[in-house]
Amino acid sequence: MRPRTFLHVLSVELRSQMSYRADFWINAFVGFLAEFGVTYFVWQAVFRESGKPIIGGYTFDGLVLYFLAVVLLGRLVSGREFEGQVCTDIYEGTLNRYLVFPASFTAFKYAQRIGNLGVAFAQFALFGIATLLVLDLPETRVSMASVAMAAVATAGANLLYFLTDNLVQYVAFWADNVWSLEVAKRWFVLLLGGYMLPLSVFPDGVRGVLEVLPFRFFFEFPARVFLGEIPFVMWVQGLALMGIWGIVAWLLGRLLWHRGQLQYTGVGI
Amino acid sequence: MIEVSALAKVFHVHKKAPGLKGSLKALFRRERIEKAAVKGVSFRVDEGEIVGLIGANGAGKTTLVKMLAGIIHPTSGSAKVLGFTPWERDNRLRRQISLIMGQKAQLWWDLPAADCFLLLREIYRVPEPQFRETIDYLSGVLDVRKELNVQIRRLSLGERMKMELIAALLHRPRVVFLDEPTIGLDLSAQRAIRDFILEYRRLHRPAMIVTSHYMEDIQRLCERILIIREGEFVYDGPLSAVVQRYAQSKVIRAHLRRTPEPVKVDGDLKALGELVECSTDQICLRVPRADVARASARILERYPVADLAIEEMDIGTIIERIFRERGEVGGLRGPAPAAPGAATGGKPATPAGEP
């Protein structure tokens, strides 16, 4: 797909999303406030009840900052509103439309996914700044360099998330309805990616394994890069590992896509 | 432009017994059955030809169209569309074909049609002047210029279908698949769409395959039809020849002048054919084609005829009868390609399994 076409698809998706103004703003506000609010009060209770000043290497303020970055950047990575679209296309037969277009389905869907991040970008801009101003948080190591590095890490994480998510969604070629699998995958990814808990609370052995798996690159890695906790060399190493996982996911995805095509019946509602 | 040889598609479907017991059993073990949707069909469609693909629900029409549009892979056989194998989805082919599915929206629900068209212009790389000219022309002909900036989901079914047509023809495809293009539309919208398809054919000479349950669509658009029943072609030939071949009889309807005595039908007349109706006003007799002249003469000679009409059986009725017939009509064939009036490229249908 030409870059120009890619950008056009992206723009159409963004416009399509903004055509429901009420939903756009409700999603932008409630989505963030509910998620971040719950996390904030739960960890406040945990710190108060445990009486410990540090849990998993984080102070309460440090943890709040971590979750703020994870929630805001995580939405840019996972594009939650877009999840399940590929398997829905397969299940409902709307994939037919894309198969007759002279364009790559994967590229088309990725452009739509990026366009779908409109809400997440609005949240990042609005609440990232607002929360930092409202909450009395200690000074952070966030710098122009860490923001630039986090932008690259987040873009890479977004692509990796898309490629790995497709692996689950392509199962719809064989199983029709993969809703339960999608839910299971989401919990698995949120837990092992550092979205629900910082990975530092896991035992050392588990952490060692999680270091090399792709999940931490979805949430923990971009957030810590943003907060200035990842030095340059580790950032490069992280990107390289992310790239390897990306290639593996892409190759597997191609295999599943081509095999799945043989099963596809194009029926649906 | 389209060449199909022994194309077949078998679906594997799961079978589940009804009721709770069946559902519970299916959780652990499901019976898988094979369903042959298309059974080795062969045909060709040439430039400028509109071929009607007709059959009852589940006959295999849409499956065949999906294979030719490259959406699904066949189980066996081959097909070439503009020299390409459709399911290999070469972009050079996809830029030259179009698929319109009346039962499925292809456009983006939340966008105005104008935005959808702009996106399609990008996808199909339509040059700007051609795009403007085509939109202007198509929206004018279909009378939807005022609706171009309305969200698709807010359009009526007829307007949406017209937008779908514009979207499908923006890139001036050389091969068009129309799957139920007028389904659910009112009569005037149906007529507008038919006229438009004919005009598009006149201007661009594409090869078209139309599936429809509306005989009006088929009669207006197609010179040649393919009748598919349970995945097999039972007829491939000119629409007009269906009547000649499968309507073995005609109906003679004689309107009578008023007479004081009631009409009495003599045995001689009954021997000529089947008496459908007899009243003081009219006699209606179904007679074999070969006996039409003799029977007409006899009626004119013996009865006070005011007006006489010889009617062909309605084509819809004939085709419906062909749908219903089973094994006993396995030998039905369209006329040979060389037969007078045969459509270009028309070939006799091939029985299942025969190469």
Image: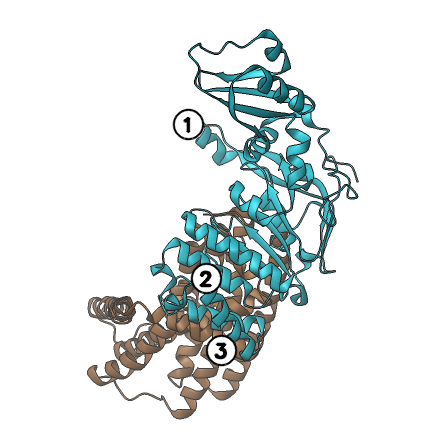
Q: Do we see residue A95 in this rendering?
A: no
Chain drawn in cyan: B
Q: Is residue B239 above or below residue A7?
A: above
How many marks the image carries: the answer is 3
Which corner quadrant holds the N terminus of chain B?
bottom right
Q: Do we see residue B254 in this rendering?
A: yes
Residue B312, position as x, y percentages in the image: 59, 31
Circle 3: element type:
helix
Residue A226, position as x, y percentages in the image: 39, 83
Q: Is residue B304 above or below residue B48?
A: above
**Alpha carbon separation for disc pair 1 and 3:** 51 Å
Taking depth in this image into account, of B179 and B109 the one nearest to the observer is B179
Colour for chain A in the figure: brown
**Alpha carbon separation for disc pair 3 and 2:** 30 Å
Q: Is residue B245 left or right of residue A18?
A: right
Q: Assess disc 2: are there few (<14), some (14-19) or many (≥20) residues with their C-alpha within 10 Å of its C-alpha.
A: some
Q: Quadrant of residue B235?
A: top right
Residue indicated by mark 2: B142
Residue indicated by mark 1: B19
Amino acid type for the residue under numbered disc 2: Leu
Circle 1: element type:
helix
Residue A17, position as x, y percentages in the image: 36, 69
Q: In the image as oriented, which residue stretches furthest toward the top? A: B267
The mark lying in front, picked from 1 and 2, is 2
Q: Name the subunit of mark 1.
A: B
Residue indicated by mark 3: A7
Lower sequence index among marks 1 and 2: 1
Q: Assess disc 1: are there few (<14), some (14-19) or many (≥20) residues with their C-alpha within 10 Å of its C-alpha.
A: few
